Image: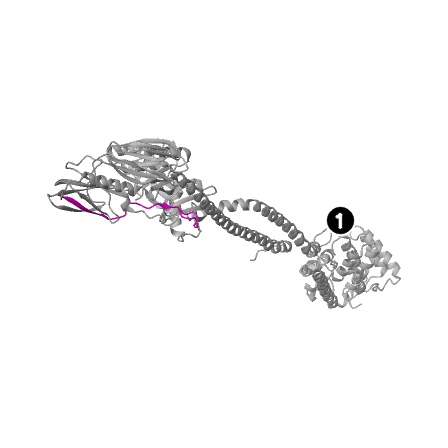
Amino acid sequence: MNRQFSFATRAFLLAFIPMALTLAASFIFVSKAVEGRIKVRMRDSLQKTEEEMSRRDADYSRHNLRALAALTENSSLKAGIGLLRETRDPALQGQAQETLASQLRQMAESMDYDLLLIEDSTEKPLVGVIGEQRVRLIVSAHPVEVVAPSLIRVHGDLYESMSVPINLGDENLGILTVGRQFNVRAWSEFGDTALIQNGRILLTSFPVARAHDAELQVQSKCKSASGECEVEIGGEAFLAMPVRQETFKGSVRLISFQSIDAATSEFTRSLTSVFSLIGGAGIVFVFLFCTLGARSVAKPLVNLVAQLKEKGSAGEFATELKSNYQTAEVNELALEFTRAAGAIRESERQLDEATLQFIESMAQAQDARDPYTAGHSERVSANSTAVAMAMGLGPAEVEIIRIGAKLHDIGKIGIPDAVLRKPGKLTRDEYTLIQRHPRIGKEILEKVDRFKDFLPIVELHHENPNGSGYPNGLTKDEIPLGVRIVHVTDVYDAITSDRSYRKAMSQTQAWDLLRKGTGPLFDPDVVEALWAVLEKQQFPDTVTRIITPHEMDLAFYSLPTRGN
Amino acid sequence: MRFAAFIVGLLGLGVLHATPVVESIQGQLVLTRVLTRQRVVLPEYSVRGVTPPRRPDTRIAVREWDRVAVYLEGGNPPKAAPINATMTQSAQRFDPEMLVVPVGSVVSFPNSDPVFHNVFSLSRIREFDLGYYPAGQTRTVKFTAPGVVQVYCHLHSDMSASILVVPNGWYVRPDENGAFAFSAIPPGNYQVVVWHRSAGFFRKPIQISSGTTAKVSVEIPVEVSETGI
């Protein structure tokens, strides 16, 4: 079975969910777009930085080279080289090298280099000093390995190097190479850096745990030597870009790794808070809007339903629904419902009337079984009605009494003609059979819910106030007033009518009988009222209908006459 | 002046070997590779960020034969008469840039430039520093031991010259084709010593028979063991 929601809930959900989804989707889209923009910007800025860095690098190199070239114009240095060259005695060669080394040390004092090296014109290392302490480099033991145009490896360390020729007159004496130990961190002002040769990391600022990851990523993703690429190291996204490409080229690349995530978060942190604020406020606004909107849309219908329920709990169909809502459809619904309910009520009324007429007909037919009792029920009804009205009962009670009186002997249908129409005295068994008719009548009528109001009259109209009646032997207080009225008028009509076994009593005789029984058998108030009624009628022998049943029905239902 | 010294040397030889001796050495030097690496200059910087490749400065052609001297060792060489040679400082160069003098010779270093010079040498056989002196003045140095003396100027780092102090009178300088000759050498076993300013010493044994002219061809650098002087 489908889940049921109230109209307001449905309206709310249908409005709120798409709006919330739209908001969320646009938030995600915008943040993605921003991230993309940031990536592009970052790439641009990196490229610009790289260009600027290259330019500065070149400038720096050029000036440095000039300065260095000037430094080699040093006759002592040249004399030292000459000395070393002319010294063939191995024992003395050490001295000559030391002489030159001390000159290099002096030069190093005024310059910030980690390595100074002199090679002869065939690029054979002659002498060098290395490190903070300017230790003389044993050049034969540590050949100079050229890794890249400006990158050499000496003594296992990488140096960023620069070389200038040493000339003497027309001759080239050799090369002076100066170098600073390559510090990969110096190039990682805003990110990590790795120096890579043929896909292997030589040096990196990455921690050891990430270095291997970085190596694999660069091998697999950064095939192009010059282009940038995106790699993921330790779950973090990086933009990898070769820097200082003029300096580091050939098999060597210096790659700068910029954390995209870090840059993005930096940029988006503020944006995110703004977006969150807008998004949050939007959601709240949408929520309120949807709630109020849904409620407002559903309100007429909810009110209509409430009206229906209220009437429904009162056990009746709503025939007078308000139709002044602001929603046209709901008004139409209310009008249609009112119309339908009216039709149903009319049908019900017609059915009731038909049923009643049918039952009355049955009662009349029952009366007609015995010529002596024909018209009996009609007369009892008329008198009872008059008495009830005289006693000041309400119209509803009067109506119950009127109809109840018409039906009071319906139970006689179940009594055989032989007993019912028997002339002369009844045997005890026959009398017992006759006494069953109130019960039979009750059993007939109680099948129809509509007749439940008449049941006391049908069942109890032979009960006497002193408890000597049948079928239950109730006493006065236990017998409803309406029943007592019918009881008296029934007896009056019976004794003032002919019977097969006797003649009708005169009015005087009848009154004597009634008066005698007043109290134990008849309700004194009722007898009094009957007397007053009969007096007023001026027709003591003929009881006629004062009010037509039809008119009484109309009074009872207080409805307009059908067709009028 | 270089040529003057050369002529002086030849005259000296001629004087020493005036007696008619038929034995002589005809020699030819062959340079198997360039011994003097030409001066290189830094190129103009049109390329950014590149360490410039060194390239030869083509303005000056180094004449290799001017940088070579030959002398003989062994036997009983005649004692060379000391000479007075001159190495002028002119146009911020030494002139000549190479001198060959026998032991005991005196070399004077007159300054003919309108600027100061400071001639010095770190060479072990004769370390000297003549100090600053202006134009017109001259200082002299006597060389009493054989060997190579490299001469520089403290003020002008590009100035340099070499003085080869030879132990005896048997020394020559090759002609522009690398040919050289010794005359009036007694028969016996000798070593031809070739000295190149940049490449250093090269030696080759030679035997001179009586009444013959020995021919020798020396390829430098030669695959012989080199020993210090």
Stretch of the chain drawn in magenta = B22-50
Q: Residues within 10 Å of mark 1 (few under 14, many from 20)?
A: few
Instruction: Judge whether B95 appears above or below A357 on screen.
Output: above
Instruction: Name the image quarter holding the N terminus of chain A.
Output: bottom right
Up the image or down, B146 lies above or below A561; here it is above
**Residue A429 in which image quadrant:** bottom right
**Point 88% across, 59% down: residue:** A536
Which quadrant: the C terminus of chain A?
Answer: bottom right
> On the picture, is A529 further left or further right than B169?
right
Residue A484 rendering spot, x and y as whole percentages: 77, 54
Identify the coloring.
Answer: one colour
Looking at the picture, tell me which residue is in the foreground, A208 or B107: B107
Relative horizontal placement of residue A499, taking residue B151 as reference (left or right): right
**Where residue A450 appears, x then y in whole percent?**
70, 60
Looking at the picture, tell me which residue is in the foreground, A161 or B7.
B7
Helix, strand or loop at mark 1? helix
Q: Which residue does the numbered mark 1 point to in the structure image?
A: A477
Residue A444 location, quadrant: bottom right
So how many labels did they put on this image?
Answer: 1
Determine if residue A12 is in view: yes
> Relative to residue A142, is residue A512 depicted above or below?
below
